[in-house]
Image: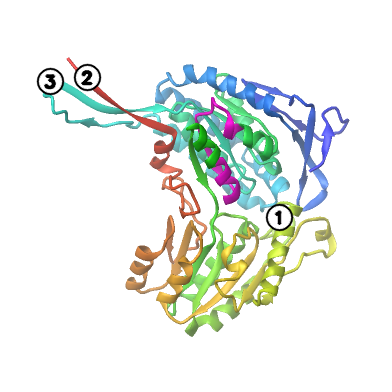
Amino acid sequence: MGVYKVNVKTDVKTYLNYINGKWVTASIQKVDTSINPANRHEIIGYVQQSEKEDLDNAVLAAKDAQVFWGKLSGAARGEYLYKVANALEQRIDKIAETMTREMGKTFLEAKGETARGVAILRYYAGEGMRKIGDVIPSSDSEALMFTTRAPLGVVGVITPWNFPVAIPIWKIAPALIYGNTVILKPAQEAAVTAAKVIECFDEAGLPMGTINMVTGTGSVIGKAITNHPDINGITFTGSDAVGKLIGLGALKRGAKYQLEMGGKNPVIVANDADLEEAVEATISGGLRSTGQKCTATSRVIVQSKVYEQFKNKLIEKIKEIKIGNGLKEDVWMGPCASENQLNTVLSYVKKGIEEGATLIYGGKRMEEDELVNGFFMEPTVFENVSNRMSIAQEEIFGPVLALINVETLEEALQIANDVKFGLSASIFTKNIGHMLSFINEMDAGLVRINAESAGVELQAPFGGMKQSSSHSREQGEAAIEFFTSIKTVFVKA
């Protein structure tokens, strides 16, 4: 990203911060450039490069607004979310196109993600009419005891670039419905898309200060959110290194925090698996969205009797993948989201080779014809991978699969669990005993049977074990546990 003065004369739109119901420029009057990863010469827009002063203004607005917003009924707050959902639905194609141009995923994936955002908003709008407590028998027969829920107050939402609609919304919607006000700090690489989502909240007419957006770097705005004394809760999705810093900062000042920090997700292919299904799921789970999902399949652990057959089918199918600009109808996989991300993936390919793995497909940047102007990476497959190698232990966030040959299911489970992460995992088998062993022994927050690892449903709790999360859960009814505090009430007549 380059730095430009706000008053640069250009036909490309400059997107502003959204603070206290108004679109405003950042205090230092500078912007970052958002470019198309499929064509680095195309500028998608300019986004504000904010400073702590801008964040302070947003916090003040959110703190003032929370007094009124928190007193509204859940039903009234839900009506606002329904309006946001309708506005987002009306803009679905435009927002999906912006997402594709800004971070590279195919238009069909982007449209599906935006539709998911609509569904999440409507789901949480309905939460405004559901119970928020329980009546508890008291030892005093003349007393009434029950629980209710209180909002945290002001919530900071820090989101990544890989799901620029779904992840912000699955954090913002529950935060709002339970009475909190919000400050969103999206990733700079996807801030234009985020601005278009916030436009939907603006159109819905939420009270001023209820939702705010401040764009800028993590080192400035992310740090300011972490340390601000008037931000009562922080929900973050991103790398484990950054997440741990946020957690430590929040802990020091007693703020509540929620961290989702990635994975190294395995698929186990048993001897009795349907290999056609397993191959399709491995490709979809590992390579769709260019492998840039926290739930993406990264390690493919295959029992020896079917290893060669599975490998050959996998390579054959990967060769059919059409790679290019995600706005083209026949393209299945787009570019890496940025040059930095492409270079990270290439560095892991180099590590894999240096550490002794065998590269059997791909491994290079794609530069033929129009692809030369983008950050395109070949789908990449390694075999002869040991579990001590970097490509078997570290999150790559790219289209790289590591094949691991094992004799037994017990060995497969041991290898699957032998990483610091525990987000998602899947197995392909027809054996009920194998399924039960996998469910009981797999250290992951999401386990899927005969389905790809990258599948999350909005009505179900989502989060990881070990270093994949801070051990809380997002989405579904579980969201209330983070965004509220339980208040126990005792009433004596």
Q: Which residues are magenta?
A: 225-246
Q: Where is residue 77? Give x, y as percent.
A: 46, 25
The residue under label 3 is which amino acid type?
Answer: Glu
Q: Are marks 1 and 2 in contact (CB under 8 Å)?
A: no
Helix, strand or loop for disc 2? strand
Quadrant housing residue 335: bottom right
Classify the position of the N terminus by image quarter.
Answer: top right
Q: Residues within 10 Å of mark 1 (few under 14, many from 20)?
A: some
Q: Disc 1 marks which amino acid?
A: Gln
First in residue order: circle 3 vs circle 2 = 3
- The quadrant where residue 318 appears: bottom right
- Left or right: residue 270 versus residue 30 is left
| Vertical arrangement, residue 323 with respect to residue 253, above or below | below
The picture places residue 238, in percent across and down from the top left corner, at: 59, 47
**Callout 2 crowding tier (Cα within 10 Å): few <14, some 14–19, many ≥20:** few
Q: Which residue is mark 3?
A: 142
Question: Disc 2 residue type?
Answer: Val
Q: Which residue occupies 62% across, 24% down?
A: 58
The x, y position of residue 361, in whole percent, is 68, 75
Q: Is residue 246 left or right of residue 5?
A: left
Rounded to the nearest angstrom, the CA distance separating label 3 from label 2 is 9 Å
User: Which residue is rendered at x = 44% and y = 58% of the image?
Assistant: 444
Label 1 belongs to which residue?
Answer: 341
- The CA span between labels 3 and 1 is 64 Å
Foreground of the two, 283 or 329: 283
Tell me the residue that label 2 is attached to.
491
Q: Secondary structure at mark 1?
A: helix
Can residue 27 be seen here? yes
Identify the residue at horizontal 44%, vertical 76% (top origin).
411
Of callouts 3 and 1, the N-terminal one: 3
- What is the residue that sits farthest to the right in this orientation? 9
